[in-house]
């Protein structure tokens, strides 16, 4: 009797387990996405989830039975902390947006899945369709850990009204440091408090002079390199035009400054009415490429929003499919022109003549100019100690003046710091 009861209990347990297994098997898979609210580029954006919602709709149509979820309302400035907390708790999303400043830490800590295998085995994916600098923004240690979703280069804003008042034509996209300095000198008038440029730094100049400050792996500093030193001297010469006065952002907003470097997203966001009136109402303005140094080209720094697949995701293949849709699909990428303010990292989308004809895009930026900007832009290396190393370099530049020997000493000190 007891034997029969034991067999019955075992059978009941197996039946219950089978029912639970069946219910689990029938339960639809849930793909989670990590996303922030608002605009990373700090520009007006009332439809921050629209691109993601559109992509999810297309994804779920192609993958019936799969549900995609995301938490809304996470502010951009709180997103990094939120994502870090999820990773520490083991509840990170299957797919998540990666802020440019967080990428190296997430890749080096093992939070991101390697994508090279998925990229190579997917017949519908072609990495060559991206601009090289955009795709490289998602590489770490020679491996691909993220796909580019949206890119924004640094562009030079120009106060057209101020230039016209001095009889100076708008510079073209092939201008040089010499052109830049000449215009700034002609515009500067200390009596009327008009100035050449605000916010242009030696870091802006060094990219355009064919160099960078650190090696890609973050083990070497090039502060004493002649191209870097030329960038420092050039930025200093522009500052000397101001006769000791510190030019401010308010001076630019009031129309008293000819040039200011900005993210391209700023131009796109504030070009249309009414934002143009609210932000810069006292003058007409446009934008051009950054001026080229003698050893470089019209190159600027590139910022790229990335998409990464969680290394512990149990839905890695599905996460890859959604990442590819957000990053690569022409229909979804084209909506950047409607719902965001960057440039698509996908060549065929960024250079589309119809998209470039949008009223909020500058007329001087043809597909050829966009191609040149995006193909040559530079993503500054970001590594574990990059922020501290940059502070050391900035301090050395501020203290050294024209003392080249001090730069060499500072370079050695920074190299020791980077390799500790």
Image: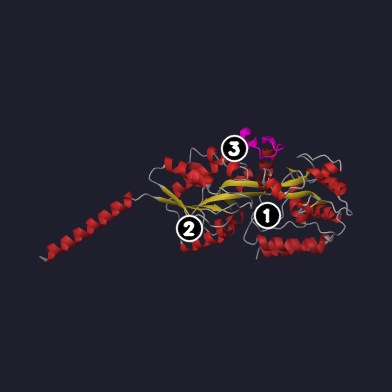
Front-most of residues 238 and 67: 67
Q: Earlier in the sequence, mark 3 or mark 1?
A: 1
Front-most of residues 281 and 302: 281
Percent of width and height locating residue 168: 84, 41
Q: Which residues are magenta?
A: 350-368
Q: Which mark is residue 349?
A: 3
Q: Is residue 101 left or right of residue 257?
A: left
Q: Which residue is mark 1?
A: 215
User: Label 3, label 1: how many angstroms apart (C-alpha)?
Assistant: 31 Å
Name of the residue lying farthest toward the right:
191
Percent of width and height locating residue 44: 62, 50
Q: Earlier in the sequence, mark 2 or mark 1?
A: 2
Judge depth for marks 2 and 1 and give the one in front: 2
Q: Which residue is mark 2?
A: 92
Q: Residues within 10 Å of mark 3 (few under 14, many from 20)?
A: many
Residue positioned 79% across, 43% down in the render: 160
Q: Is residue 24 shown above or below 374?
A: below
């Amino acid at each position: 009797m007891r034997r029969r009861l034991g067999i019955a209990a075992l059978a009941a347990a197996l039946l219950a387990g089978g029912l639970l297994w069946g219910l689990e098997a029938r339960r639809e898979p849930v793909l989670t996405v990590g996303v922030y609210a608002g605009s990373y580029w700090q520009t007006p954006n009332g439809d921050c989830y629209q691109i993601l919602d559109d992509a999810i709709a297309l994804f779920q149509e192609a993958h019936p039975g799969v549900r995609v979820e995301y938490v809304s309302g996470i502010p951009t400035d709180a997103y990094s902390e939120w994502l870090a907390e999820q990773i520490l708790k083991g509840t990170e999303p299957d797919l998540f947006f990666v802020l440019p400043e967080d990428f190296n830490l997430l890749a080096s800590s093992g939070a991101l899945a390697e994508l090279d295998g998925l990229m190579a085995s997917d017949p519908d994916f072609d990495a060559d369709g991206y601009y090289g600098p955009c795709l490289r923004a998602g590489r770490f240690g020679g491996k691909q850990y993220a796909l580019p979703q949206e890119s924004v280069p640094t562009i030079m804003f120009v106060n057209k009204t101020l230039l016209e008042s001095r009889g100076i034509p708008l510079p073209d996209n092939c201008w040089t440091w010499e052109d830049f300095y000449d215009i700034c000198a002609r515009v500067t008038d200390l009596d009327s408090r008009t100035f050449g440029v605000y916010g242009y730094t030696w870091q802006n100049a060094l990219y355009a002079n064919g160099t960078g400050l650190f090696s890609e792996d973050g083990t070497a500093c090039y502060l004493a390199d002649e191209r870097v030193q030329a960038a420092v001297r050039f930025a200093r010469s522009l500052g000397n035009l101001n006769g000791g006065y510190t030019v401010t952002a308010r001076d630019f907003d009031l129309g008293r400054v000819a040039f200011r470097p900005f993210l391209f997203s700023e131009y796109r966001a504030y070009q249309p009415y009414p934002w143009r009136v609210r932000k810069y109402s006292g003058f007409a303005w446009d934008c051009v490429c950054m001026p080229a140094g003698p050893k470089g080209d019209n190159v600027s720094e590139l910022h790229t929003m990335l998409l990464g697949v969680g290394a512990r995701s149990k839905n890695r293949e599905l996460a890859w499919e959604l990442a590819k849709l957000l990053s690569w699909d022409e229909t979804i990428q084209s909506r950047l022109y409607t719902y965001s303010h960057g440039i698509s990292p996908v060549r065929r989308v960024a250079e589309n003549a119809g998209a470039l004809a949008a009223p909020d895009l500058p007329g001087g930026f043809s597909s050829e100019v966009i191609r040149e900007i995006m193909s040559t832009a530079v993503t500054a290396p970001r590594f574990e100690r990059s922020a501290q190393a940059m502070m050391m370099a900035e301090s050395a530049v501020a203290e050294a003046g024209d003392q080249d020997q001090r730069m060499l000493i500072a370079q050695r000190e920074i190299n020791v710091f980077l390799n500790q």
